[in-house]
Image (cartoon, rainbow, N blue to C red):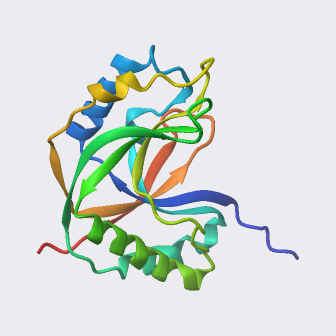
Amino acid sequence: MRKPQSKNIRLFIALPLPVPIKDQLKLWAQQNKESLPFRKWAHPDDYHITLQFLGEMPADKLEALNIALADIHYPTFELHLTDVGTFGPSAAPRVLWAAVDGDLVHLTALHGEVVKKTSPLGFVPEEHPYKPHITLARTFAGEGSLDVTAFSSFHSSQRWLVDHFVLMRTHLNTSPMYEVIGKYPLQPR
């Protein structure tokens, strides 16, 4: 008798954002949606900083992934928002994002630790350099170039302590579309 194949799940590893940071981004997005015509705006509960996109994987490999991620011992660090920008040409940007700053050395090193722990499980790191950001919207729907005057209205002085990272599952065609299925603490300094 043939054993049934396990169901595939779509996963990524991320830093969640605290509620006050999500609220600040949500307010800015609401105030600027009309002047920034993007087709798909992220649900505020889906705001995050990706550490590694994993893609589709068999659900029966989830336990090995959890063990690998739980084995990451890394110190806490601070981040803050800086500004907003886009990926892609100004006539048709693909992504509207919020930038992060702060202890980017530790953020980049944590990204490296995650990649190091997931590589033996067959996950391949992305080829382009790591650029931490928070996706706010996708696919520009306006005519002509994007009017970036709204970008200057973004201001933030809130810092937050990054004290854990999460494993998230994607549920396509839902909103919010991301579900936390694993939480991994960082070590207090």
Q: Position of residue 177 (x, y in %)?
A: 52, 40
Picture layout, residue 71 above or below residue 154: below
Q: Position of residue 166 (x, y in %)?
A: 38, 60
Q: Residue at x 28, y 64 (%)?
A: 104
Picture layout, residue 169 above or below residue 96: below
- Residue 158 sits in quarter: top left
Count of labels in the image? 0
Residue 185 visible to an observer of this rendering: no
Q: Residue at x 53, y 20 (%)?
A: 37
Q: Residue at x 19, y 65 (%)?
A: 77
Q: Is residue 115 left or right of residue 145?
A: left
In the rendered view of the protein, which quadrant contains the N terminus? bottom right
Q: Is residue 185 left or right of residue 86?
A: left
In the rendered view of the protein, which quadrant contains the C terminus? bottom left
Towards the viewer: 59 or 13: 13
- Residue 111 sits in quarter: bottom left
Residue 122 visible to an observer of this rendering: yes
Considering every residue shown, the one lying at the far bottom of the view is 120
Picture layout, residue 98 above or below residue 121: above
Q: Position of residue 52 (x, y in %)?
A: 49, 64
Q: Is residue 160 left or right of residue 118?
A: left
Q: Is residue 77 left or right of residue 85?
A: left
Towards the viewer: 55 or 128: 128
Q: Position of residue 122 (x, y in %)?
A: 63, 79
Considering every residue shown, the one lying at the far left of the view is 189
Considering every residue shown, the one lying at the far right of the view is 1
